[in-house]
Structure formats: structure tokens, C-alpha cells
Image (cartoon, grey):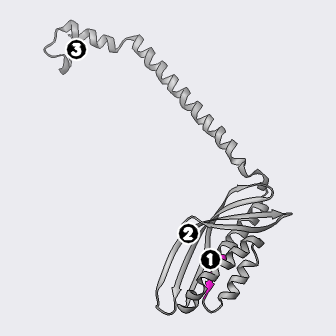
Amino acid sequence: MDATTPADAGRPPEEAASERSALASPWLTAVLVLAAVVLTALVVLQVEEAERGADQTAPATAPLAERAERERVLSVASRTAAAVLTYHHDSFDQDVARASATLEPDFAAEHVEAMERVRRVTVREEIDQEASAVASGVVSASDGRAEVLVFVNQETTSGRTGARRFQRDRVVVSLVGEQGAWTVAGVTSLG
């Protein structure tokens, strides 16, 4: 008895049989097996290349490879970002002076000048701003320079109006270092 499928109904038996034999042909099987082998080899090569690429980009911060030095850079950047962005209406001058003392002289002068522009409104409106660094990571580093991305949460309140605002910010902290001592040469807000 000849096996037929519903697709074979109404067609001459020779035509239906030739299609089934073409699908079951050893040539077709060989081509499909070869295609599977080639695709597997391509996937393996791409995975190996991606792993090599990841290994080559990892040492971008090689001069800061020592864990203690890396942690020191992250700590200085996080502390300074929080200090520069924190001030209170009743201790404004002391807060600015304390933050400026940890900065490179040129950047300290810029910071004092920028804060002087907000001083009057801060005191009049009784504004307090608390900033805290919640995460940080080294963007680039060499023996004497580093850039650190710091994620900062800021809460600003006005004692006069009772208004309260919470903001998340990202800042890039530029550091310069000599003999393991790092100071901040700039803080740039990314918003």
C-alpha cells in the first residue's frame, strides 16, 4: 500500500513520491548538516572575539589597577561631589569654605565665585541642600589624572516656603594626583 498525505490528495502518485524523495535525499541532508556546522563555527568565533575584545578594554585603567588606589580615587570623588553640592542657609560661608579647602586652587576659586551668586537667595529663602553620593565609577585614569562618574541624590528644602525638592544628578569629578594624594580639579554636572 502506498502512503499518501492529505497534501498528496488529487495529485498523481509519481509527483507526490518525487517530492517526498527530494526531501529525504542524502544531498539535502548533507547540505543542512554542513550549514549547521558552519553556523556553529561562526557563533563560536564571534563569542571568542567578544571575549578577547572585553579582555583588551578592561585594562583601560591599568595605572590604577591596585584596588586600594582605585578605592581612594572613588572615595575622594564621592566625598567631594557631596561636599560641593551641600550647603545650608545658616552655615553657608563655612560650608563653601570647607568644600573649597579640598579643591585644586583654580577650581576652588571658581567654586567660591559660583556659590557667591546663590548666597543671597540661599540665606533669604532659608535654603538647605543635602547631597549624598550613592554610586561612583572610574571613567578614565592614568598615573596623575582620573575622571570619576558620581551619581548624587540632592534634597533641597526652603525653610521660608516649606518647599522640598528631590533631584538625582550625575557629575563627572576630575581629579589630579601626586604620590597617592588626590585633589579635585573640576566637577561637571551631567544632569
Badges 1 and 2: C-beta atoms under 8 Å apart?
Answer: yes
Looking at the rendered image, the quarter that the N terminus falls into is top left
Q: Earlier in the sequence, mark 2 or mark 3?
A: 3
**Kind of element beneath mark 1:** helix
Measuring from the top left, give residue 101's x and y in whole percent: 76, 78
Whichever of callouts 1 and 2 sits on the residue coming sooner in the sequence is: 1
Q: Earlier in the sequence, mark 1 or mark 3?
A: 3
How crowded is the residue under tag 1: few (<14 C-alpha within 10 Å), some, or many (20+)?
some
Number of the label disc, if any, that sits on residue 169: 2
Amino acid type, label 2:
Asp
Q: Residue at x 47, y 21 (%)?
A: 35
Q: Which residues are magenta?
A: 83-88
**Mark 1 residue type:** Leu
59 displayed left or right of 6: right
Asked whether residue 83 is in view, the answer is: no
Which residue does the numbered mark 1 point to in the structure image?
85
Determine the image quadrant of residue 16. top left
| Label 2: element kind | strand
Of marks 2 and 3, the one in the foreground: 2
Q: Secondary structure at mark 3?
A: loop
- Give the residue pinned by disc 3: 3
